[in-house]
């Protein structure tokens, strides 16, 4: 049984223009199927506005889902009331993008890490102290006695993100959603933080959803990669497959856009997917990528492509691979 | 505001004192607090209330509308103080002789009360207090006024009708008549109305015919000669006795003078301080806290709750405040704490709710709130531990700044006659002064002193508020 299973999960945001007009819906997440095994790390990659952050937050029930199902450890939590979700909030945690805003400025590091323990009524003061110091050690904020009484504004961006990771880990969750955890950090500490998260993920065999727009780093930090476009997952498969033989034209375009560190190739023009990401209020009919796709066929404009499994674990939604 | 986490209450206080305005404001506030503590300790609450109500005619020996003592130095004149010569107490200057007429029940009594008078102005009033002991008939007396120059003026023949009586010499018709008679027969016809106390204390020549020219006949000179009040009388009965107390009311009293009811205004000035501070701080604090909680509820829960609270606030904002208070106070007696409660009820949904809600909306979107939701913090926990600590520091200048508003509100209600009827407050003093024409009569201290107290309070909180504003809104700092 997978740890987490999403079935046709949707999150539509209602947009009211006036009181009397019919509300419009922004389909940020539109029918996502995904399953995640225990201890597995999966990357969700896509360009800005494709709904990947919304998907992450909906999984954590920070947003109310509009439709579909979220099944966690075999329990359907899609429409569970917030009060009845405390057990889930202990098992699923978030690491946010902005380490400068994600820590309450008026709490010390110690208090920040104690908050989740207090809410879930874990241990007594002494036990909590041990847990907090241990958590600080695991994220390598040592000496812990020195960091515990500090306020967030006394820490660097990388240190803050370590505190945020420690906070997410302290409840020993089964699932962590890391929402672009390094995009606001200095390039010099990015790899370090990513490595730390990967280490911890393996050490505590947690499942990891790594949301990013940086396809280049995903191979090293996740077993599987899923590509999201306009609120839908259009390709999903093992990391090596996706990187080495991308199937969907959008994935191919994304891969071509990755900068090449080889100086000899610096003059080669990098093809970027032409056009703009679609308007999610009225997405294009048929395949949502068809206005930008170089291989558009007639059927692409009419009918949305089904999930096509070329191998057991490599799915693509593109008419190019449909059995005629 | 990213560094607002550093702003603890303690550090704010410390930082306020680095600004000049903060120092001055804090100094004034400290002075006012010291005054409050002194007032509460020196004059206990019950005593202050009793004094202000004038219980047991405790002010009877105090002049009406007296100037503050320090007016002596402003006017460079030795203004008269009150002289009390009490025969019952056995004060020096009282001579008492009782002779029994043999074979009868009748006693002859001679009572002489003498005192020196060296002031540069006439007294404001002269009263005579009798303590009589009689069984059969009422004591009959004759009163003479003997000036230092030897002139002897018979003032009145008088029957004492009660064991304790006050003879108001300077407003008694008979006394006035005999004094005028004295002037007419010795000096001439007065040019204008001259007060009895002027005739009693003036030099006997033409100058006394007008209040402008009258000179005071002082006791000191080549030799000391005293003013004497002489009482001759007859008492009936074996145990009968008579004692008298002469009070020559001066024109200065205490630090703040007296009002039209002879009350010492400094009591109201002193006790007005703790009342004003307590009232201002309590209402400001209570209203701010209630508005804060409502604003956070409105901003955090959003949706229908927010809609209802916001519309209610808009309705509340157009309710005219003062007319509403006047209406309530005409139906109910507003003690100071009831007034706080009414204020609270009238401002629960005040304009502060709107501005605080705006802050809440901003804080609500902070990622750390989202993180708290992710690890399962309840709404109540988020409101009290995550939102309020963040929006409290920027609210403090407003809180402090609104204190004088409430102090003035209390004063204006008292001025309109709607305040707590028993408490001695600054507003009440101003109201008394106003309704007794203090400006017209030149009793400037009566209006001036309570006004200065009000202004000091306002300035103190305003200055502290300015300093706080600079700390909490760093863009206002002058470099």
Image: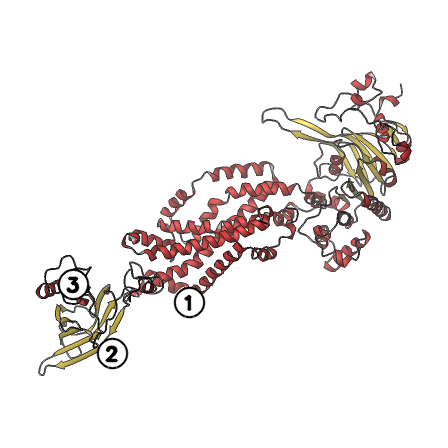
Residue A145 appears at what percent x and percent y? Answer: 76, 59
Q: Residue furthest top?
A: A298
Q: Is residue B281 visible?
A: no
| Discs 2/3, front | 3
- Disc 3 chain ID: B
Which residue is more in the foreground, B436 or A56?
A: B436
The residue where tag 3 is placed is: B208
Q: CA distance from mark 3 to mark 1?
A: 45 Å
Looking at the rendered structure, whether the residues under marks 3 and 1 are on a common chain is answered as: yes
Residue B325: give x, y in percent of width and height. Answer: 40, 45
Q: In the picture provided, is B248 more to the left or to the right than B427?
A: left
**Residue labelled with disc 1:** B42
The picture quadrant where one finds residue B39 is: bottom left
Circle 3 residues within 10 Å: few <14, some 14–19, many ≥20: many
Give the answer, above or below, for where B395 lies relative to B92.
above
Task: From the viewer's perspective, tell me whether residue B155 is left or right of residue B402.
Answer: left
Distance, label 2 to label 1, CA atoms, is: 31 Å
Q: Chain of mark 2?
A: B
Q: Name the residue furthest bottom.
A: B102
Badge 3 element = helix
Location of residue B373 with respect to B253 vertically, above or below:
above
- Are marks 2 and 3 in one subunit? yes
Chain identity of mark 1: B
Mark 3 / mark 1, whichever is N-terminal: 1
User: Which circle's residue, 2 or 1, is located before the other in the chain?
Assistant: 1
Name the mark nearer the viewer: 3 or 1: 3
* Residue under numbered circle 2: B92
Disc number lying in front (2 or 1)? 2
Q: Quadrant of residue A26?
A: top right
Q: In this view of the protein, which residue sits in the foreground, B475 or B91?
A: B475
């Amino acid at each position: 049984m997978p740890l987490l299973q999403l079935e046709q999960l949707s999150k539509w945001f209602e947009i009211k223009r006036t009181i009397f007009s019919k509300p419009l819906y922004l389909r940020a997440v539109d029918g996502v199927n995904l399953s995640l095994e225990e201890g597995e790390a999966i990357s969700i990659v896509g360009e800005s506005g494709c709904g990947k952050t919304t998907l992450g937050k909906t999984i954590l029930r920070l947003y109310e889902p509009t439709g579909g199902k979220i099944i966690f450890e075999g329990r359907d939590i899609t429409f569970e009331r917030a009060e009845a979700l405390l057990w889930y909030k202990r098992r699923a945690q978030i690491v946010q993008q902005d380490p400068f805003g994600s820590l309450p400025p008026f709490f010390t590091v110690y208090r920040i890490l104690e908050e989740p323990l207090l809410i879930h009524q874990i241990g007594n003061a002494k036990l909590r102290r041990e847990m907090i110091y241990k958590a600080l050690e695991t994220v390598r904020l040592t000496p812990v006695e020195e960091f515990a009484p500090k306020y967030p504004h006394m820490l660097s961006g990388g240190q803050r993100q370590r505190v945020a990771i420690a906070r997410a880990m302290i409840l020993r969750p089964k699932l962590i959603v890391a929402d672009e955890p390094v995009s606001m950090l200095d390039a010099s500490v990015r790899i370090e933080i990513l490595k730390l998260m990967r280490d911890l993920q393996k050490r505590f065999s947690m499942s990891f959803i790594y949301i990013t727009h940086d396809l280049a780093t995903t191979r090293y930090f996740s077993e599987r990669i899923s590509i999201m476009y306009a609120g839908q997952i259009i390709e999903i498969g093992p990391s090596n497959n996706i990187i080495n033989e991308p199937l969907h034209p959008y994935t191919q375009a994304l891969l071509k856009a990755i900068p090449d560190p080889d100086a000899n190739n610096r003059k080669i023009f990098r093809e970027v997917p032409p056009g703009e990401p679609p308007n999610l209020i009225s997405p294009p009919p048929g395949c949502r990528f068809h206005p930008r796709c170089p291989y558009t066929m007639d059927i692409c404009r009419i009918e949305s492509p089904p999930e096509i499994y070329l191998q057991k674990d490599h799915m693509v939604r593109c008419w190019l691979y449909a059995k005629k | 505001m990213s560094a607002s986490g550093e702003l603890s209450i303690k550090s704010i206080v410390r930082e306020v004192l680095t600004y000049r305005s903060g120092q001055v404001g804090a100094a004034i506030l400290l002075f006012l607090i010291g005054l409050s503590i002194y007032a509460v300790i020196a004059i206990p609450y019950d005593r202050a209330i009793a004094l202000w109500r004038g219980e047991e005619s405790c002010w009877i020996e105090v002049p009406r509308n007296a100037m503050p003592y320090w007016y002596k130095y402003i006017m460079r004149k030795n203004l008269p103080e009150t002289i009390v010569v009490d025969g019952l107490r056995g004060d020096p200057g009282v001579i008492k002789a009782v002779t029994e007429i043999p074979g009868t029940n009748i006693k002859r009594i001679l009572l002489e009360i003498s005192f020196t008078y060296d002031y540069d102005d006439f007294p404001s009033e002269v009263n005579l207090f009798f303590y009589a002991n009689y069984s059969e008939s009422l004591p009959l007396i004759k009163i003479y006024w003997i000036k230092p120059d030897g002139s002897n003026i018979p003032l009145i023949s008088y029957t004492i009708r009660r064991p304790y009586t006050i003879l108001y010499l300077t407003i008694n018709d008979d006394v006035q008549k005999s004094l005028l008679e004295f002037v007419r027969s010795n000096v001439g016809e007065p040019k204008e109305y001259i007060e009895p106390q002027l005739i009693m204390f003036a030099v006997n020549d033409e100058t006394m015919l007008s209040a402008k020219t009258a000179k005071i006949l002082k006791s000191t000179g080549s030799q000391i000669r005293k003013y004497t009040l002489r009482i001759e009388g007859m008492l009936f009965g074996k145990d009968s006795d008579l004692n008298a107390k002469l009070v020559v009311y001066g024109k200065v009293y205490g630090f703040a003078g007296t009002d039209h009811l002879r009350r010492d205004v400094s009591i109201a000035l002193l006790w007005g301080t703790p009342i004003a501070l307590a009232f201002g701080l309590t209402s400001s604090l209570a209203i701010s806290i209630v508005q804060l909680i409502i604003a956070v509820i409105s901003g955090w829960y959003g949706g229908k709750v927010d809609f209802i609270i916001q519309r209610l606030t808009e309705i509340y904002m157009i309710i005219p405040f003062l007319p509403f208070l006047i209406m309530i106070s005409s139906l109910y007696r507003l003690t100071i704490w009831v007034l706080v409660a009414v204020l609270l009820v009238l401002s629960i949904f005040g304009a502060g709710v709107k501005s605080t809600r705006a802050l809440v909306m901003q804080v609500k979107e902070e990622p750390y709130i989202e993180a708290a939701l992710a690890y399962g913090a309840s709404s109540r926990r988020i409101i009290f531990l995550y939102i309020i600590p963040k929006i409290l520091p920027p609210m403090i200048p407003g809180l402090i700044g609104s204190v004088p508003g409430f102090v003035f509100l209390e004063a204006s209600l008292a001025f309109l006659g709607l305040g707590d009827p028993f408490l001695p407050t600054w507003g009440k003093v101003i109201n008394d002064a106003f309704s007794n024409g203090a400006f017209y009569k030149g009793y400037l201290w009566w209006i001036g002193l309570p006004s200065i107290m009000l202004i000091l309070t306002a300035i103190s909180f305003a200055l502290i508020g300015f300093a706080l504003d600079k700390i909490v809104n760093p863009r206002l700092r002058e470099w």
